[in-house]
Amino acid sequence: MLTAKDAKNSQNASYIIAGTVVANFMILVLVLGPESTGFDPTWGPVSSLLNFFNAWFTLFFLGSIGVVFKVRKSGELYILNRIVWTLTAINLAYTLTALFQENSVFETLLDADIISEISGLPTNALFLVFGIWALRLISLDSQNLIEGWVKISGQGFGYLVIVAQIGSMFGLIPANAFGPLFILGGVILFPAFIIGLGKIVGSSTTEG
């Protein structure tokens, strides 16, 4: 199990993850708008750094989730946790590429706008898998650790992001509905679920 220090660090990581998600969604939806493309010279660096810290702390948080929820005892949950961890690691590798490209001193064939578009591609799969992961984590919670508002927010996020991503994939989500969906899922439900999981992890210590 986790030590008290590891549990506390993981709970703090959940706050950072939730905070960076909210800040980034506010930039993408309310400041830039869903029609925005490429690397914005003003907000692009901010978004890149937020994505980097989000992915960094998510990797460690997923490790703690694996310990507390004993995912190794569930083949499906173990595989899902590894898939989300791997996609997050891939996403981490892309978070700063556009920022480096924008300020590169070397001549390049691809500009920051193109790199930014390419870098965002793994995020689509990550959102979809995160939704599946949330629903299965709740369903396979044999210890009944996830209850109340944490369970409700997790289920709401899971179903919403799956519907939104599949709808977006086939062009079924109109542009004017994209913002509200992402605000509900990304600014309210997902951060609430992550913070709730952080509280569970923070109270699951058995060692000093």
Image (cartoon, helix red, strand yellow):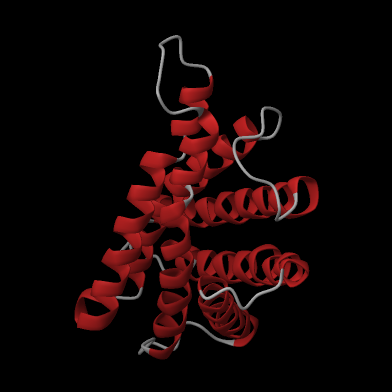
| Viewer-proximal residue among 90 and 204 | 90
Toward which corner of the image does residue 43 lie, by quadrant? Answer: top right
Which residue extends farthest front? 109
40 lies above or below 11 = above
Which residue extends farthest top? 105
Residue 139, x across and y down, in percent: 41, 90
Instruction: Tell me the quarter of the image containing the C terminus.
Output: bottom left
* Residue drawn 56% across the image and 75% down it: 161
* Residue drawn 59% across the image and 76% down it: 164
* Residue drawn 24% across the image and 73% down it: 79
Residue 63 appears anywhere in the view: no
Q: Is residue 137 left or right of residue 13?
A: left
Q: Is residue 51 left or right of residue 189?
A: left
Residue 76, x across and y down, in percent: 25, 82
173 lies above or below 5 = below
Residue 171, x across and y down, in percent: 58, 73
Toward which corner of the image does residue 186 lie, by quadrant? Answer: bottom right
Toward which corner of the image does residue 94 lie, by quadrant? Answer: top left
Total residue callouts: 0
Residue 191, x across and y down, in percent: 62, 64
| Viewer-proximal residue among 56 and 42 | 42
Residue 19 appears anywhere in the view: yes
Instruction: Tell me the quarter of the image containing the N terminus.
Output: bottom left
| Viewer-proximal residue among 118 and 55 | 118
* Residue drawn 75% across the image and 72% down it: 177
